[in-house]
Amino acid sequence: MNYYSLNKSASNVNFREATIKGQAPDKGLYFPETFPVIDPSVIADMEKYSKEELAFTIMHPYVGDTIDKKTLYRIVSETVNFPFPLVQVNKNMFSLELFHGPTLAFKDVGARFMSRCLGHFSQEQDEKITVLVATSGDTGGAVANGFLGVEGVEVVILYPSGKVSPVQELQLTTCGQNITALEINGSFDDCQAMVKDAFMDADLSKKLTLTSANSINVARWLPQQLYYFFAYQQWQEKGQPPIIAVPSGNFGNICAGLLAHASGLPVQHFIAACNVNDAVPQYLRSGIYEPVIAEATISNAMDVGNPSNFIRIMELFHHDFANITSQVSGYTVSDNATRKTISEVYTAYQYTLDPHGAVAYHALAAYLAQQQQQKGIFLETAHPVKFPETVEAVTGKRIDIPEETKYLFAKEKHSIQLDASFDELKAWLMEQ
Ligand SMILES: *Cc1c(COP(=O)(O)O)cnc(C)c1O
């Protein structure tokens, strides 16, 4: 499988190059040349597959011969070595819990897959690879954990000082080894702009092999398809495929789901659930796409004004508005509605939502209210303990910290403080 740049002027590359480069030299996002067609017998007999077998079957066409089969099998097995349970919440709504990985959010899968692929590729070359990534919270922890100890790869994470939750900050500042946290005196948008400038800088690209670990990187984006296969594997009513609601920010996750569907996975309809940062739901209503300036909300991982994967969704549907809207609906959910949803679902079903899952739950419930007899899945993308202030205030109940996370609180934070200026970042990187 080769990948082309959505800006159409860079040359096509294989999976290895797309992963190492992150973004094409013409600044476009890489996109697969074709969509693999899943063998219908795999769909029909999916329960017979283990998670590992299924993950290998789905990922192999995308990786092609850039990684030998045995190594790829090991990589996907390590990527999905925790549960992805589908939990029934009420009569017609199910939660796909994607927070059972090491950093308690769904980004673990993409980060684990990408880190292992990059580690494998770096063994084949002498140069060290430097991963540069900006985080609004969850990406940093997942990337730090996924890349910790990977030889030949240095990871530099930029995060906005004081704007991530305590668990999130510990996850990205306590790793040590090949992981460095830069605490930026500014906003997430500042961090993202500094990273973008770094990729464009000629001096830095001469000195370092820089790549990004955001969902623009195909190795982080593509394995997110696996959630949708794991969901379908556990779906009881195969004759009536699910409606799936995805809490969306940069739109990498839902775009991966749409790709799985394009490859043959049965899904009845997708719902893009956003907080007030709703450029895409607005587009789905009006046909006009206008990026917004991101506003801070209680579902902070979705505070994105100009989602980078929207362009991939457009490509997937050949820029055909009627085609997109026949398969995807958009919903905008306010912070008040999100809090109310957390409270109501806790009271009625004793199920604790995190703010991101609550946005998706709310959108799915609104959609199902218009559809008799339908059933759906919402993706629960983070453990509620990552957002204790919001969730505990609404439910009035303390959230127990999972055993796997307790060790973090005994660790010491290490970060390097920088002003929100590209020159400071550049000076620091040039000394590494
Ligand atoms: C990153 C994130 C999202 C948004 O996912 P995208 O792929 O950027 O749309 C949703 N929920 C949580 C908890 C996240 O960390």
Image (cartoon, grey):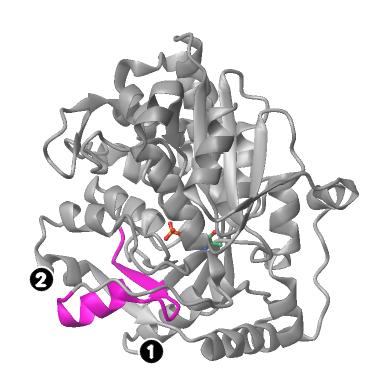
Residue sitting at x 41%, y 35%: 219
Q: Secondary structure at mark 2?
A: helix
Q: State the residue in front, 381 or 249.
A: 249
Residue 132 placed where, x, y %?
50, 39
Tell me which residue sits at (75%, 62%) in the image. 166
Badge 2: residue crowd in 10 Å (few <14, some 14–19, many ≥20): few
Question: Can the viewer see residue 153?
Answer: yes
Q: Is residue 81 visible?
A: no
Query: Which label sits in the foreground, 1 or 2?
Result: 2
**Number of the label disc, if any, that sits on residue 326:** none
Q: Disc 1 marks which residue?
A: 369
Query: 415 or 52, which is in the foreground?
Result: 415
Residue 72 vertical position relative to residue 32 in the rendered view, above or below? above
Which numbered disc covers residue 322?
2
The magenta region covers 267-288
The amino acid type found where label 1 is placed reads Ala
